[in-house]
């Protein structure tokens, strides 16, 4: 193409765009056509620089906004700009599978991927038998676009170790913007105001529980960046700065579930660093469970005597975690859990359908379990559990499929960590494992995997574990081959 032709083409396209834009502004009173160049640029990046687009989504995730906060009165909702981009990536991923006639067989047959087939397969079955099939199929599709982008394509992305650090840095840098935004609002109410801590991060995060969960999720990785001595001083310095910001933000979030999850993750970190054997830990866990079962009546009576309610005083706020008598937050969780259990009793095999809890749970609330914050529309969270939610929505097999997936992720992660010989690889794997553990512990008290805020980093960290599992297996295989050839 000659220069003259290029110039003519450029001005022709520009003129058509300007005319279309003016037409829609004047006659339709809309600026949507102005977004066309942005859409074309995104398509170009998705086709030729997909890794750049995935990392860009990581940056936009903490800053994404629900559509209903931008446009009122819609019957559907999604997070902007992340979910439309993820939908496009899912379509592109399907086309790439067709074009390349498949995908990496080692990944497709990996134990975690097999567990995902079980999880997604049963969810699809229960979506088809759902009381609200359209809601359930949309919920299932949303799982697909998260997994396509940050599990299957994430595995390809994270084969370059630098992209792991880029992902963490980009998410955390954007998160810092949210932290300062929340602090600026919190300052107006006074940092001693624990009730303000529940909503100051809105609209970026729905409430302090999802905000606290993601702060806790990234703290292990930031700790690794800070204390891994082989990193450059500049990286360790900025890792320490961001770690400090996240720790302060976690305290000011007043999210007791996030505090608990980080404490458990720290214990696991210590256990793995000290190389404590699994058998004594397993026996100890069974012994504690047996004691709880034997003395459950006495334990319940002790919990009922705790009347400490959540407050700005950190000591009182921590002790209120076991208040199941007067603390509205704790009582509402019990209300939601009870609803999930009664929903499961009515539909034990297939459940009510994925994503339907918030629409179906209201009739299952008992008057004696309702609290001052109870509603009939689940506008304060769903089932408040990543385990009981699937039980109500997909039956007992749905709950077991998620538990099996979680166990498989941790099993593969721990074995990968013990196989790894390079210190940097061990640091990354341990950070990913403990980050995932914070979420799995938090999942007993809340559920966020239906949102981009939690789902994107969660599946990204699972992808990191798979990448290094395959990498360490290859190392072991090559070492065995060399040993055999030397005999």
Image (tube, rainbow, N blue to C red):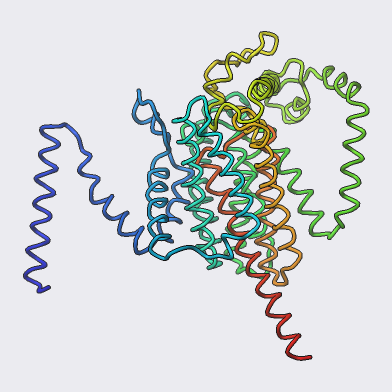
Picture quarter containing residue 367? Answer: top right
Q: Nearer the viewer, residue 196 or 266?
A: 266
Looking at the image, residue 239 lies above or below residue 358: below
Q: Nearer the viewer, residue 321 or 197?
A: 321
Say left or right for 359 vs 413. Answer: left
Say left or right for 107 vs 406. Answer: left
Say left or right for 107 vs 313. Answer: left
Q: Where is residue 47 shown, x and y percent of the image?
A: 34, 61
Q: Where is residue 116 shown, x and y percent of the image?
A: 60, 49
Say left or right for 192 vs 420. Answer: left
Q: What residue appears at the point 62 percent right and 12 percent down from the top-left corner?
A: 372
Furthest-top residue in view? 367
Q: What residue appears at the point 69 percent right and 61 percent down from the top-left corner?
A: 227
Q: Nearer the viewer, residue 392 or 422?
A: 392
Which corner quadrant holds the N terminus? bottom left
Q: Where is residue 131 shown, x and y percent of the image?
A: 51, 24
Looking at the image, residue 435 lies above or below residue 107: above
Residue 186 visible? The answer is no
Residue 486 visible? The answer is yes
The number of numbered discs placed on residues in the rendered structure image is 0
């Amino acid at each position: 193409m000659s220069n003259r032709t290029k110039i003519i083409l450029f001005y022709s396209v520009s003129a058509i765009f300007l005319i279309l834009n003016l037409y829609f502004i004047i006659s339709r009173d809309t600026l949507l056509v102005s977004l066309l160049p942005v859409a074309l640029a995104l398509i170009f990046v998705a086709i030729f620089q997909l890794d750049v687009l995935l990392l860009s989504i990581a940056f936009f995730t903490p800053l994404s906004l629900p559509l209903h906060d931008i446009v009122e009165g819609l019957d559907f909702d999604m997070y902007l700009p992340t979910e439309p981009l993820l939908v496009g990536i899912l379509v592109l991923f399907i086309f790439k599978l067709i074009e390349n006639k498949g995908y990496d067989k080692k990944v497709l047959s990996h134990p975690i991927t097999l567990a995902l087939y079980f999880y997604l397969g049963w969810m699809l079955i229960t979506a088809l038998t759902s009381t609200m099939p359209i809601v359930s199929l949309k919920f299932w599709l949303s799982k697909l676009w998260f997994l396509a982008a940050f599990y299957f394509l994430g595995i390809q992305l994270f084969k370059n170790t630098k992209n792991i650090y880029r992902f963490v840095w980009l998410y955390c840098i954007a998160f810092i913007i949210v932290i300062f935004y929340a602090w600026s609002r919190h300052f107006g109410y006074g940092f001693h105001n624990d009730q303000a801590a529940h909503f100051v991060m809105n609209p970026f995060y729905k409430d302090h529980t999802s905000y606290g969960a993601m702060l806790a999720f990234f703290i292990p990785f930031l700790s690794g960046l800070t204390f891994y001595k082989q990193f450059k001083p500049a990286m360790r310095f900025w890792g320490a700065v961001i770690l400090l910001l996240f720790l302060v933000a976690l305290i000011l979030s007043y999210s007791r579930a996030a505090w608990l999850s980080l404490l458990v993750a720290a214990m696991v970190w210590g256990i793995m660093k000290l190389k404590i054997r699994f058998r004594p830990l397993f026996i100890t866990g069974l012994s504690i469970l047996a004691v709880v079962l034997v003395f459950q009546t006495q334990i319940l009576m002790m919990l009922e005597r705790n009347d400490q309610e959540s407050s700005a005083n950190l000591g009182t706020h921590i002790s209120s975690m076991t208040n199941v008598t007067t603390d509205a937050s704790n009582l509402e969780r019990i209300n939601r859990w009870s609803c999930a259990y009664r929903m499961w009793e009515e539909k034990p095999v297939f459940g009510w359908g994925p994503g339907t809890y918030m629409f179906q749970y209201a009739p299952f609330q008992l008057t004696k379990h309702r609290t001052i914050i109870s509603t009939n529309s689940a506008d304060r969270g769903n089932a408040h559990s990543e385990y009981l939610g699937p039980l109500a929505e997909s039956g007992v097999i749905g709950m077991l499929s998620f538990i099996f997936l979680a166990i498989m992720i941790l099993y593969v992660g721990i074995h990968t960590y013990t196989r790894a010989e390079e210190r940097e690889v061990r640091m990354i794997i341990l950070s990913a494992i403990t980050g995932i553990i914070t979420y799995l512990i938090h999942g007993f008290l809340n559920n966020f995997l239906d949102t981009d805020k939690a789902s994107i980093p969660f599946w990204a960290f699972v992808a990191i574990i798979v990448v290094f599992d395959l990498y360490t297996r290859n190392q072991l295989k090559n070492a065995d081959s060399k040993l055999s050839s030397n005999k």
